[in-house]
Amino acid sequence: MKRTARHPETHARLLAATCGFAIALAVGGTLAHTAGAFSAPRMSEAHSTDLPSFRTSLFAGSGDCAFCHTSDGEVLRDSQGNDLSMPEDWRATMMANSFRDPFFQATLEREVALRPHRQGEIEDMCLRCHAPMAHTQAHYDGTGPLSLAHARLSPLAAEGVSCTVCHQIQPDNLFSEESWDGNYIIRDSAEIFGPYEGVYQWAMISALGYTPKFGAHMLTSEHCATCHTLFTPIVDEAGKTLGRFPEQTPYLEWRNSIYADATNAVSCQDCHMPVIDDPVYISHDPPVTERSPFWKHHFVGGNTFMLSLMRDNIERLGVTAEERHFDMTIERTRRQLREDTATLAVVATELEPDHATVVVRVENLTGHKLPTGYPARRAWLRFVARDGDGNALFESGAWDNSGDIHGVGEDWQPHRDLIADPAHVQVYEGIMADLQGRRTTSLLSAASYLKDNRLPPRGFRADGPYYADTAIIGDAATDANFNREAGVEGSGSDRVAYRFPLSGHPPETIRIEVELLYQSIIPLFARNLAEPETPGGLDFLELYAQRHNQPEWVARVERLLVARPSAWTIY
Ligand code: HEC
Ligand code: HEC
Ligand code: HEC
Ligand code: HEC
Ligand code: HEC
C-alpha cells in the first residue's frame, strides 16, 4: 500500500527544516512560478497516487501538508483510534477532484463550443472555482486569464480545492457579495489560517515558509460561500449582458433558514466537517499539545455517482486517491444521504368504495434546498401500492438503468400535489430556461427557472433574505402544503397525495412502499454533451456509458394498510 508523498527531496527539505534550517528551502527551484511553465504532472509518466509536493510563491502541494498532518501513533486519532488525517479524508472528495472531474471538463468544453468567441473568458471563469490554485497563481503572476489547455498541464490545477486554497482565504471581503462567484482573496502573506489560537508556528515557518495562525473566518459559512454562490451572466446574442442567473445558491438558501439565525447557528462546517470533542494532536512533527474540538475533513454531499466513476478510472483520470479512499468517501456520502438528509412518512389514508388515497410527507433536514447546488441534481418520490398477493395496484416514479424516470423520460413535469395517474411523478428540481423560455442544460444559456420546487430548508420564507434569488417557482408556490404545515410557512416539508382505483372489490390489505431518491446527473445533462461534439464530451460519455445511472435512496418507508369498515388502519 502506498503512503502519502515522501519524495527524497521533500523529505530532506522537511527534515532539515524541522531541525532548524531556514525558509530558503521552501522553493526547490524545480517549479517555475509562472502558470505557463509548470512541469508536467507526474501522471503522464507511470501513474502515481502519491500526493504531490511543490511550493510556489503562493501555494504548496497537499503532499507537503501530509508530511506532518498524517496520523502516526497517537497523533491525529480520535479516542477510538480512528485515523483523522486531513489529507486522507480530503483526497477522495469532490473538492479534491474538482478539476479532474470529467463531467466538469466535458461541460466546460461544451459551454465554449456553443460560443467559441468567448473561450478565454469562459475558461478563466470556470477555473476560478474548479482549479483555484492554478487560477489564482496565473493572475498573481500576470499570466492570466487561465486557459483549460494550460490548466491541464498544471499540477496546481490537478489538486482542485486543496489545503492551501481554503486555509489562505483572507477575511477581507467575506460577508460581502463581492466574495461570491469565486472572488475569494488569497495573497502572498503566507498565512495559514486555522481554528486554534496560539499554535506552535516554527515547524511550518521553517518547513514551508507559512505561518499558521487563528482565523475566526475559518469557522464561518461565508468562507464556503465564496465558491458556493454562483451567478452566471445572462448574455444575449449581440453580446449584451442583460442580468445574472442564480445557478448555485446553497449559502443564500441557508441564510433564509433556521440554521442561519443567531440562536440556531449551524454553519456549513458544522454539517460538512463533523466535529468531535476528543483531544487530538494535529501534527506529528512535532505533536505540541492536544487540541479540541477537532473538525474532520469529510466534505461530503450527495455525489456517489461521480465518486464511483472516478474510483473505477483512477489511472485514466490521473487521480491521487486510491480505491480505499473513494470507498470511504462514498460510504460517508451514503450514510449522510440516508441519515441526515430527509425524513419520509405515510401520514393519512382515505378509503372510498372504489379508490384509496394515501398521503406521503417528506421533510428536508439539510441546511439548504434539497437538492441544492449544481442544477443537474434531482430528487423524486417512488410510490408503490400492492395488494395482498404483492401485485402492484399503482406505481409512480420507477426508473430504468439509464436513469430515466418512467412517465418523465427526457421531459420534465410540473410540481404535483395530487397524483392519480401513474405517469405523473413528484420530482424536486430546478429546471433552467434560456432567453426564449426553452429548457436548457447549458449554464451560460440559462436566464430563468421554469420550475423550482426543490424542498426548502426549515425556516425558509418568501419574505426572508435573498428570496428573489432562491424563489419557489411554478405550482409549488401555490401548493398549500409545500413548505407549510397548518398554514405556517417554513416547514421545509411537502405532502403529496396518491389516489388510485381499487378495481371492483377492495383488497383487505394494501402494502405501501415509498422511497425518496436522489440523482446527481439528470440523464439529459449527460446526453446533451454529445452536441456539439467535443473531445471532453466524447471522453466523458464513454465513461458514462459504462455504468447505470442509478439514484441513491435517501429515505424509505413501508406500511401495511388494513381495511376496517369505515377507514384504513396504518401499520
Ligand atoms: C474546503 C476547505 C478546506 C480544505 C480543502 C481543507 N481544509 Fe483544513 N480546515 C478547513 C476549515 C474550515 C477548518 C476549521 C473548521 C472550523 O473552524 O469549523 C479546517 C481545519 C484544519 C486544521 C485544524 C484541525 C481540524 O481539522 O480541526 C488543520 C490542521 C487543517 N485544516 C489542515 C488541512 C490540510 C492539511 C488540508 C489538505 C489535505 C486541508 N486542511 C484542507 C477548511 C479546509
Ligand atoms: C513540518 C511540519 C508541518 C508541515 C509540513 C505542515 N504543518 Fe501545519 N502545523 C504543524 C504544527 C506543528 C502545527 C501546530 C500544532 C499545534 O500547535 O497544536 C500546525 C498547525 C496547522 C494548522 C492550525 C492553525 C491554527 O492556528 O489553527 C493548520 C490549519 C495547518 N497547520 C495547515 C497546514 C497546511 C495547509 C500545510 C501544508 C501547506 C501544513 N500545515 C504543513 C506542522 C506542520
Ligand atoms: C475555492 C472554491 C471552494 C471553496 C472555498 C469551497 N468549495 Fe466546496 N466545492 C467547490 C467545487 C468546485 C466543488 C465541486 C467539485 C465537482 O463536483 O467537480 C465543491 C463541492 C463541494 C461539496 C459537494 C460534494 C459532493 O459529494 O457532492 C460540498 C459538500 C462542499 N463543496 C462543501 C464545502 C464547504 C463546507 C466549504 C467551506 C468550508 C467549501 N465547500 C468551500 C469549491 C469550493
Ligand atoms: C443542517 C446541516 C447542513 C448545513 C447547515 C449545510 N449542509 Fe450542505 N448538505 C447537507 C446534507 C445532509 C447534504 C446531502 C444531501 C444533498 O446532497 O443535498 C448536503 C449537501 C450539500 C451539497 C451537495 C448538494 C447536491 O445536491 O449536489 C453542497 C454543495 C452543500 N451541501 C454545500 C453546503 C454549504 C455551502 C453550506 C453552508 C452555506 C451547507 N451545505 C450547509 C447538510 C447541511
Ligand atoms: C463560483 C464557483 C464556481 C464556478 C465559477 C463554476 N463552478 Fe462548477 N461547481 C461549483 C460547485 C461548488 C459545484 C458543486 C455543487 C454541487 O455538488 O452541487 C460545481 C459543480 C459543477 C459540475 C457538476 C460536477 C459533478 O461531478 O456533478 C459541473 C459539470 C460544473 N460545475 C461545471 C462548471 C462550468 C462549465 C463552469 C463555467 C461555466 C463552472 N462550473 C463554474 C462551483 C463553481
Image (tube, helix red, strand yellow):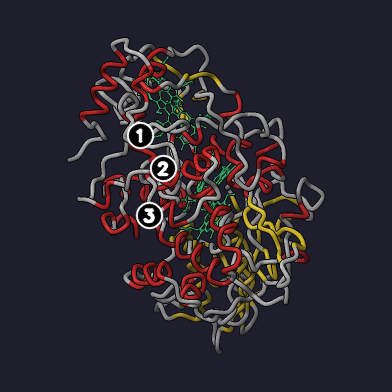
Number of residues whose C-alpha sits closer than 10 Å to that of mark 1, classed few (under 14), some (14–19) or many (20 or more): many
Horizontally, residue 153 falls left or right of residue 262, namely left
Position of residue 568 in the picture relative to residue 436 (left or right): left
Disc nearer the start of the sequence (1/2): 1
Q: Give percent across and percent down for residue 131.
A: 48, 47
User: Looking at the image, which is closer to me, 393 or 428?
Assistant: 428
Give the amino acid at mark 2. Leu
Is residue 508 in view from this perspective?
no
- Regarding residue 209, the answer to whether it shows in the image is yes
Query: Could you tell me which secondary element the residue under label 3 belongs to?
Result: helix
How far across and how far down the image is residue 5, in percent?
A: 26, 34
Q: Residue at x 32, y 24 (%)?
A: 68
Disc 3 beta carbon < 8 A from ligand 3? Answer: yes
Q: Secondary structure at mark 1?
A: loop
The residue that disc 3 covers is: 307
On the image, numbered disc 2 is attached to which residue? 156
Q: Which residue is disc 1 drawn over? A: 54
Amino acid found under the numbered disc labelled 3: Leu
Tag 2 near tag 3, CB within 8 Å: no
Q: Residues within 10 Å of mark 3 (few under 14, many from 20)?
A: many
* CA distance separating discs 2 and 3: 21 Å
